[in-house]
Amino acid sequence: MPAKIKWEAYESFTINASELEEYLIKMFNLRDPRDPRYAYAVNTIPLMIWGAPGVGKSAIVRQAFIKAVYKLLEDNNELEKTRIFKKEGGVIEVIDENKFRKMFRDVRLSTLEPVDLRGLPMYTETKMGIKRTSWAPPIFLPLPGEKLGDDGPDIKIALLFLDELNAAPKDVQVASYQLILDRRLGEYVLPDFCFVIAAGNPPDFVPQLEDMPSPLRNRMSHLTLLPEVKPWLEYAREHDVHPVVVSFLSIPEHEHMLYTFDPKEEVNGATPRSWEFLSTILKLYTPEGSTVPVKVPNSIIYGLLGKTAPIFITFISSVYILPDKLKPILKNNVAIIYDWTKDDVIQMLSKIPEYGRKKSEIREMVNSSISYTLEKVPGVSNEKDAIAHLALNIRYIVLERILSYIYKYRTVGKLYEYDTDIEEFVDDLVKYSNYCVVNSTGMEDIIPTIFKELFKAGYELEKEGNTKLISILYTKSAEYKKSYPNLWNKVELVLKQMKEEAKKE
C-alpha cells in the first residue's frame, strides 16, 4: 500500500470557522443572472472541507446555508409562505426540519453503493417502440420544479452536501467524479440552483482510510478546518450552548481544550461536537429559570471529554459554589480577588441573603473545590494558588452568566429572575461593573466584553422595533457617566470600537 499523505499537507490550506462561514455565505448568495429569485451554482468550484473528527465541518456548512436561505427567502418575500425559520434577536432557528432538508441534502457517501448514487436502472420505451435503459435518480438529488411542501413555492436554492466522501467505497468515489465535475450523473443533471460541497476526515485520523484518488482530489478546491476558540465561542453564544461550557472555554488557559481528542489513544475526547453534546446534557441537569446545573455525574463528563474531563470537573466545582441566580451576584458584588484567603471567600459568600446556605455548607463546598483543584490542576501546589484559580473561574462564570442573560433578553425578551425588567438588570449590572473596576477584582479586564454585547443586543433589538434596551442605555448614560466615571470611560471606548468596526463592514 502506498504511503498516505501526511496531516501536514492538509494543514497547508487551513481556514478558521468564521472565515469558512463567510466564504460559504458569499458562495451561497450567488444569484442566477437570468432570474435573480434563484441561486446560481453553475460556475462555482466544488469544495472539499477536511478536518479532524468532531471539528464542526457539517455544523458550519449548515449554519452558513441557513443564513443564505433565510436571506434568499426574505429577498423573495417568501419567508411567511415557507414558515421554515424563526428569527429572534438576530438568531435564526430552523422550525420545520422536513422542509429545510428539501434544500439541505446531507448525503453520507460512506453508506452508499454505486447504484445508490446513480439510481436504479429501468426500462423506457421510445416512440419507435424500442426499449432502452435509463436510471431513476435517488430522492436525495434535487429536481427543477420541486416545491417546499405541497402548497409552498418552488425550491430556489439547494445544497448537495457529500459528507464522508473519502470514507466511501472506491467505486462510489469514482461514481461521484461526474457529479462533482460535470454536475450530472448519466442523464440526471443537477439544477443550476444546487451547490456541491464535500467533507471528510484526513486518513491520519482514521487509520482504515486511504487517500482520496488523485483524479477526484484534482476536481475540487480543498480547505482544512482548524478548531479556533474565538469563532467557536461566538457560535456557541448565538446557539444557546450552556453558559458553563462557554465560560470554561472563555478562560485563556482553557482555549486549547476546545479540541484535545486523540483518536489513536482515546475512546472519546474534547471536540467542538462533544462540547455541544455536554451542553445538551448540562441543560438536562439545569432547573428551569437557572443557568447552574445540579451535580452532574463525573462519569458522564469523562464519557464525552476524555482526558480533559478532570479540568472541567474542577471548574464545575467552582460553579456549584455560586448562587444559581445572577441577581444576588450583582447586588452583593460577588467577585473573588486573587490574593484573598479561604476565609475571605467563605465570609463573602456567607453574606449573600438570597444564597440560603449555612456557613458550614459553604465552607464544605469551598474546601472541596480547593482540594479537587490541588489534586487535578497542573501547576497548582498550595492553597493560595488554588484560591487564585477559583477567582479566575468565578470571573469567567460570572461573565458568561451575564452574557447568557443578555442573549436571553435578545431572543425571548426575558431575563430569568429579572423577567422583563431590563432597566433593573442594567442598573444592577452597571453598579456591579463599577465595583469591579474600582476594587480591581480582576473582572475589570472583561467588563468591555459585557458592555459590547449589551449594546450589540440593543442595536439588534432596535432593528426589530424593540427600542427599550437601547433607550435605557442612552437616556441613562449621562447619569452613569456622572456616578461611575471610571467605568463609563471604558464603556465609551467600547462604543468607539464598535463604530469603527461597523464602518469597516
Image (tube, rainbow, N blue to C red):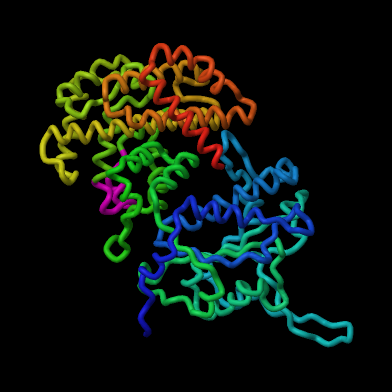
Tell me the residue at 46%/16% (across/down).
424
Quarter of the image where the N terminus is located: bottom left
**Position of residue 101 measured from the top left corner of the image (x, y, whole percent):** 62, 55
Q: Is residue 1 visible?
A: yes
Q: Nearer the viewer, residue 215 or 293?
A: 215
**Position of residue 459 measured from the top left corner of the image (x, y, whole percent):** 56, 29
Q: Nearer the viewer, residue 116 or 318?
A: 318
Q: Is residue 305 magenta?
A: yes
Tell me the chief SS of the magenta region.
helix
Tell me the residue at 19%/19% (across/down).
347
What stretch of residues is rendered in magenta? 296-310
How many numbered badges does the structure rendering display? 0
Q: Nearer the viewer, residue 8 or 417?
A: 8
Q: Nearer the viewer, residue 51 or 175?
A: 51
Q: Would you place residue 221 above or below residue 158 in this image?
A: below
Q: Would you place residue 253 above or below residue 223 in this image?
A: above
**Position of residue 215 measured from the top left corner of the image (x, y, whole percent):** 53, 80
Tell me the residue at 29%/45% (across/down).
254
Query: Which quadrant holds residue 320?
Result: top left
Q: Is residue 66 magenta?
A: no
Name the side, left or right, on which 327 lies relative to 154. Answer: left
Name the side, left or right, on which 91 lies relative to 320. Answer: right
Query: Which quadrant holds residue 486?
Result: top left
Q: Is residue 59 visible?
A: no
